[in-house]
Image (spheres, rainbow, N blue to C red):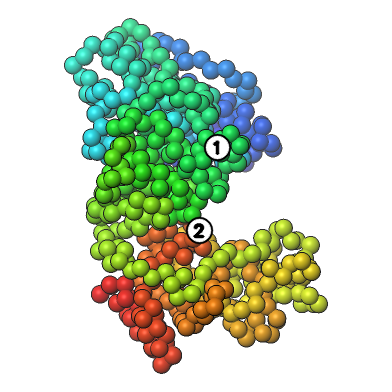
Amino acid sequence: MKVSFASTEWIDSNADPLIRYDACLAMAKGYASSKKSDKMRLAHAKAFCAIAVESYWDAVCERNKASLPVKSVELDTPSLPVDVNKLASAAGRLISQFPVEDAGFLAGNIYTAMLPSSRRSALGAFYTPPPLVKRLIEMTEASGFNFATGNIIDPACGGGAFLVPLAQRILDQLDSFEPAWKLRQLEMRLHGCEIDEFAAWIADVVLEASVLPLCIVAKRRLSNVVTVEDSLRTEATTEYDLVIGNPPYGRISLTKSMRAKYARSLFGHANLYGLFTDLALRLAKPRGFVAYVTPTSFLGGQYFKSLRQLLTSESLPISFDIVSDRNGVFDDVLQETILTVFHRSPEAELTDKAVIVSALVPQGLNSSRIEPIGNVPIKGSGDPWLLPRTADDASFLHAISKMPTRLSDIFYCVSTGPLVWNRHRDQLRTERGADTFPLVWAESVSSDGFKFKAEKRNHVPFIAIKEKQPHLVTGDSCVLVQRTTSKEQGRRLVASVLPASFIAEHGGAVVENHLNIVCATKTTERPSISVSTISTLLNTSAADRAFRCISGSVAVSAYELNALPLPSPIQIAELESRIEDGASREAVELLVASYYGIN
């Protein structure tokens, strides 16, 4: 039997509103995914959410005994089936049962969940849950921002997840003033920008709904505070005391003019949130604040080295909160998340930089737990920023910050596997033949050792190498390290040796680019430390813990491996001697832990 989208038989009306909201979200997402094209899916997403937002507005008006039309938006949307229309209306009324600060997130979350994945990725649209919004606002106030006088911009405001709580915080500071004056203050001091016109409309509607009692007493509507524009391409004419928000993220291809505009913060590939961080520094007044929710990848990735240098040359880091559990925080997001507050300062380059680091543990829709970690120095260069993830890591980080040895100091370097397999489809082979070499995939590498296999989908064991492709062949024994792991895995560093015997048997091997290659540098100096010792060292818990303080993304990059603090050459030589004498894995773990200052 077909179940109606509007059926409430399996959604208990007495259930927790958040459970009911999640059910509505799932059904809305399922309805959108049934559309055959991205164009249809987008149109139906807007039609659904327009009904939901209008229903939310009507419910708020009823509660306040007002009869006001919702703000208008130009839409050319299809008619929805009766049951879907009812579902959208029910979703809007359900959202009205939550605190007003939640409405921008809850309405916007339905919209982004229904979007075609290509459009969502292009917009980088992942709206901020209320606990993170509330905490970031608290962090800015603790850092010295004054909500009674300061002007604020969210340059990528989405559905208003930040604007509504910010408005409430401003109004809290103006409690004794006349309603009409309060509205003028909001209109003058709170501003949002959004590239998506429909999301901007959602933001303006939920913002006015949040101050509707004030509008009724003042006998006037709240003017729109959101401008529909691409902040990155607009030349700003106003400076702000606070730039705050959750900028979109994802790689972006830049025009020559855009690359020139943001050249100071770019190194290689551009990421949207990196550009918005650069923009924030331009928008903030000389004594203003920048407060963002972003992925943590800027802490260590090579592509962000110029941005790190810019941040420390123009601002002082005040406080960082690392979100300790990303599950359920952002819908369909895998990156580790961080909340940051920076203070723009003309003296930034001359000032020692230390940041207050905490862990933020979300607990439901409207609360979180904060676990202090400690004060951590930040390098004023483009080098990776080492940040502890737990209080126990703070003392550990202090120890490894004094470890100067890197792979280059023992004559090793890291590169990425040279083969991008889908660019060489015509060369892939299922059987060994003339001019073929083994194709090494990440599945062949584990901390228990190398085992050649190609069992996953699209994987084949061999590749034919053409005359002008000798650069694809690895001819020496080396250490292979998986390039994609996550914080939830037991290990971030997963390494094994590509054996010399395997190389000799096949005359070489081709390493796919989901692996890093740690090999001897091509210099007159040859490493005295074996690849086996390097692999063992990388597979220890202590080295893995050190890497977690560097890496903020799911990628294990060559750049970050090259920056990994290591025991001294003398200590590594001692480790090799102990391994050769037959030391157990437990003994190796204890020895390496002692090198890293772990009791």
Q: Looking at the image, which is closer to me, 75 or 33?
A: 75
* Left or right placement of residue 10 versus residue 427 in this view: left
Which of the two discs, 1 and 2, sits closer to the camera? 1
Measuring 33% from the left and 56% from the top, which residue is drawn there?
387
Residue 122 relative to residue 56: left or right = right
Quarter of the figure with the C terminus: bottom left
Residue 251, placed above or below residue 110: below
Give percent across and percent down for residue 38. Answer: 66, 36
Q: Kindly indicate the quadrant of the structure image that contains residue 80.
A: top right
Which dot marks residue 260?
A: 1
Q: Residue at x 40, y 47 (%)?
A: 309
Residue 536: horizontal and vertical position, in percent?
45, 79
Question: What x and y, as percent, mark residue 323?
Answer: 36, 50
Q: Nearer the viewer, residue 342 or 221?
A: 342
Instruction: Residue 48: name its quadrant.
Output: top right
Look at mark 2 in the image and give the residue it sits on.
555
- Disc 1, disc 2: CB below 8 Å? no
> Mark 1 to mark 2: distance in Å?
28 Å
* Residue 261 position (above or below residue 565): above
Q: Amino acid at mark 1?
A: Ala
Numbered mark located on residue 297 in the image? none
Residue 438 visible in this rendered orientation of the protein: yes
Q: What residue lies at 41% left-to-right and 44% top-to-bottom?
A: 310
Task: Report the residue that reaches farthest toward the left.
Answer: 176
Q: At numbered mark 1, what does the secondary structure look like: helix, strand or loop? A: helix
